[in-house]
Image (cartoon, rainbow, N blue to C red):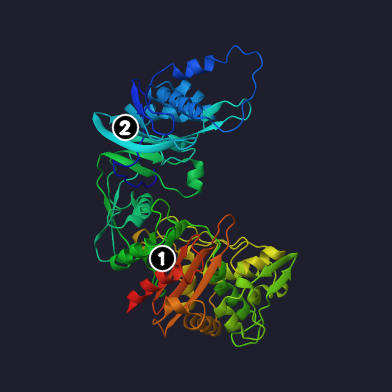
C-alpha cells in the first residue's frame, strides 16, 4: 500500500451499515427533532404511486424533500440495507459497491448518525461507529455532508452521490480497508535529528504520507493494523497517497532523515498562516536541499504538487531563452506597447501601462507583458519548451525528491497561446517548488534537482538538465533579477536584503477568480524561495512578504 497520514479520532472516520435505530437531530427551518426509522420515506413514495401520468417536478427542493431524502438514505445505511440506501442516491451502483465494502472490507459496525442544521439542499451529519478487526476494537467519529438534488428525468429528489458522503477523505473510486498495512510507518527526522511530525508542523502531513509510501519498506520498519483510505485510479493519477485514518495496533517505524531545517520549517508554517491559500518552498541552490515546505491548506501539498499558471515569474525562463538567442540583452532599448496583437488576440499590460522608451531590463523590472510577447514572431513553437527542459529541468516528469511532485509543464503551443506562455499563462503550469528551483538555477548557473531525502538513502537517480546556461547568460539574468529586487516590482518586499539577491514577481489570471494568483520567487546568497497566494492579488504584495521573511533568515 502507499503511505498514509494518521488522523486524530475526533476528526473524520469511516462508518458501517449494521442494523439498529439511529437518533437524528435536525436543525434548520421547519425541521426540528425527529427519529429516523424505516418506512418514512416509503410512505411518502406511495402517495403518488397511483398516478397514471406523473408530472415531472422541477424547481428548487423543498425542506420536506431534503429532509425525507436524507432520512431515507441515512436510515437505510444505518440499518445495513445497502440496496435501499443506494436507491436513495443518483448513482445507485457506485453507492452500493462502496457501502458494501464498508462492512466487508472496513469492518465497521454500530453506526449512529446525528444530523446538523440543514443549509438549503445540504445536510451535515456526524457519524460514530466502531472498527472491529481480529479481536481489536476502536471507536471512531467523523463529520460529513450530503446534498440532495432533483433528478432531471423524473424530478425525484435523491442524494447526490460521491464517496465523500460517507467519509470526507474519500474521493470517487477510493475505498476503506481495515487490515495489516502494506507499508510500515516511518519516523522522519529533520536535518538536526529532531522528529518531524504533523502535530509539530501541520503542513507536513502529506509529506509524511509520501515518505512512508517511498521509504516504508526500505527503512527497517514493521507494518501495523490500521483503517486506511485505499486510493482508486483517479486519486492515484492525481498523486494522492493512501491515508491512515486509525491505527488498531502500531507498527514499528523505520527512520528516514530529511533535509528539512526546523527553524525554516517553523517560520514557513507561520508565514503561510497569515494568508488564505498560501504555499511556499525554501531550498539551498548549491545542493538542491529542500529546507522548508508549507501550505495554508494542510490537505493538499500545493507547494510540491500544485499545477498553476506561474504568471510573470515565468519571464525568468523566457528571458534566458531571449538572451541565449541573442534577441535582446538587459541594456538594449526595447519598447513595451500598451497593447499587442498576436494571432487574433490583443494582449494588454497590467493596468494598461506602457514603456515607450526604455531598456529590456526596465521592462523586466516593471513586469511589462508586451515586451516579451512581441518576440513571439521570432520564435518557434517549441523554443520555450526546450529552454525549460534543457536548462531548468522542468516538464520532464523525472524529479525524484523523495515524495510525489509535479515537475512543471511547458507544452509546445502555437499562435496566441505560445505568446501567452512567454508570460507564464497559456498552458504553462508550475508550483512553488518548481519556481524556487528556477531561482536556484539562476543563482548557481546550474540546475540541481531539489530533494527532501538524500539520494544516497535509496540510490535513486536524480534528474539532470541536458545543458548549462553560459556564464554570460547567468550574469544577465542576475542583472535583471537584481534590478527587479532593487527598483522594480519586488523592491518593497526585498528591501534591505541586498546586494547578492534577485527576485521576480508574478500575477496569474484565473477564470472565475476576482483576484489573480500572486507569485514571488527570489534568491539571496545560498538560499532560494518561491511562494504563491491563490486569489491573493499582485505577487509583490502577497507572496512577496512570505518569501522575503524566509530569505532574511539566511543572515
Is residue 382 visible in the rendered structure shown here?
no
Residue at left offset 40%, top offset 64%: 451
Residue 281, labelled with which disc?
1
Q: Is residue 214 above or below residue 334?
A: above
Residue 21, labelled with which disc?
none
Q: Secondary structure at mark 2?
A: strand
- Image x and y of residue 203, in percent: 36, 56
Is residue 128 visible in the rendered structure shown here?
yes
- Can you tell which quarter of the image residue 514 is in? bottom right
- Image x and y of residue 72, in percent: 45, 23
Residue at left offset 33%, top offset 25%: 23
- Image x and y of residue 66, in percent: 49, 29
The C terminus, quarter of image: bottom left
For marks 2 and 1, give the CA distance: 38 Å
Label 2 crowd (10 A; few <14 / some 14-19 / many >=20): many
The N terminus, quarter of image: top left
* Residue topped by disc 2: 128
Amino acid at each position: 500500500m502507499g503511505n498514509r497520514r494518521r488522523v486524530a479520532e475526533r476528526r473524520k472516520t469511516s462508518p458501517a451499515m449494521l442494523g439498529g435505530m439511529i437518533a437524528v437531530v435536525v436543525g434548520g427551518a421547519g425541521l426540528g427533532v425527529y427519529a429516523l426509522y424505516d418506512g418514512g420515506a416509503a410512505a411518502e413514495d406511495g402517495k403518488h404511486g397511483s398516478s397514471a401520468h406523473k408530472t415531472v417536478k422541477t424547481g428548487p427542493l423543498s425542506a420536506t424533500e431534503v429532509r425525507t431524502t436524507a432520512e431515507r438514505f441515512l436510515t437505510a445505511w444505518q440499518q445495513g440495507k445497502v440496496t435501499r440506501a443506494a436507491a436513495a442516491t443518483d448513482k445507485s451502483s457506485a453507492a452500493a459497491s462502496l457501502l458494501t465494502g464498508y462492512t466487508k472490507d472496513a469492518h465497521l459496525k454500530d453506526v449512529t448518525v446525528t444530523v446538523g442544521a440543514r443549509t438549503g439542499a445540504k445536510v451535515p451529519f456526524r457519524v460514530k461507529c466502531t472498527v472491529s478487526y481480529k479481536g481489536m476494537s476502536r471507536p471512531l467519529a467523523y463529520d460529513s455532508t450530503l446534498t440532495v438534488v432533483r433528478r432531471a428525468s423524473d424530478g425525484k429528489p435523491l442524494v447526490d452521490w460521491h464517496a465523500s458522503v460517507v467519509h470526507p477523505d474519500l474521493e470517487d473510486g477510493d475505498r476503506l480497508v481495515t487490515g495489516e498495512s502494506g507499508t510500515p510507518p516511518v519516523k522522519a527526522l529533520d536535518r538536526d535529528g529532531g522528529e518531524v511530525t504533523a502535530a509539530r508542523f501541520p503542513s507536513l502531513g502529506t509529506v509524511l504520507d509520501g515518505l512512508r509510501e517511498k521509504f516504508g519498506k526500505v527503512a527497517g520498519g514493521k507494518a501495523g493494523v490500521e483503517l486506511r483510505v485505499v486510493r482508486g485510479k483517479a486519486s492515484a493519477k492525481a498523486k494522492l497517497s493512501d491515508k491512515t485514518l486509525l491505527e488498531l495496533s502500531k507498527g514499528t517505524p523505520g527512520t528516514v532523515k530529511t533535509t528539512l531545517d526546523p527553524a525554516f520549517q517553523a517560520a514557513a508554517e507561520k508565514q503561510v498562516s497569515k494568508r488564505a491559500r498560501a504555499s511556499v518552498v525554501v531550498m539551498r541552490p548549491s545542493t538542491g536541499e529542500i529546507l522548508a515546505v508549507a501550505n495554508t491548506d494542510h490537505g493538499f501539498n500545493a507547494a510540491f504538487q500544485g499545477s498553476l499558471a506561474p504568471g510573470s515569474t515565468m519571464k525568468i525562463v523566457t528571458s534566458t531563452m531571449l538572451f541565449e538567442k541573442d534577441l535582446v540583452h538587459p541594456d538594449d532599448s526595447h519598447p513595451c506597447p500598451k497593447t499587442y496583437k498576436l494571432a487574433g488576440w490583443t494582449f494588454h499590460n497590467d493596468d494598461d501601462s506602457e514603456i515607450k522608451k526604455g531598456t529590456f531590463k526596465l521592462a523586466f523590472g516593471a513586469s511589462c507583458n508586451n515586451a516579451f510577447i512581441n518576440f513571439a514572431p521570432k520564435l518557434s513553437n517549441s523554443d520555450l519548451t526546450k529552454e525549460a527542459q534543457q536548462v531548468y529541468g522542468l516538464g520532464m516528469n523525472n524529479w525524484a525528491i523523495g515524495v510525489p511532485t509535479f515537475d512543471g509543464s511547458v507544452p509546445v503551443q502555437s499562435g496566441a497561446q505560445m505568446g501567452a506562455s512567454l508570460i507564464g499563462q497559456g498552458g504553462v503550469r508550475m508550483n512553488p517548488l518548481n519556481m524556487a528551483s528556477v531561482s536556484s538555477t539562476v543563482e548557481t548557473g546550474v540546475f540541481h534537482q531539489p530533494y527532501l531525502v538524500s539520494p544516497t538513502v535509496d540510490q535513486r537517480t536524480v534528474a539532470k538538465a541536458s545543458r548549462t546556461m553560459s556564464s554570460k547568460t547567468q550574469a544577465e539574468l542576475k542583472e535583471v533579477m537584481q534590478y527587479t529586487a532593487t527598483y522594480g516590482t519586488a523592491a518593497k518586499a526585498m528591501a534591505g536584503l541586498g546586494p547578492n539577491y534577485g527576485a521576480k514577481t508574478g500575477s496569474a489570471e484565473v477564470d472565475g477568480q476576482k483576484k489573480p494568483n500572486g507569485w514571488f520567487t527570489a534568491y539571496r546568497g545560498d538560499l532560494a524561495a518561491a511562494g504563491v497566494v491563490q486569489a491573493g492579488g499582485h505577487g509583490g504584495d502577497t507572496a512577496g512578504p512570505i518569501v522575503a521573511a524566509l530569505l532574511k533568515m539566511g543572515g
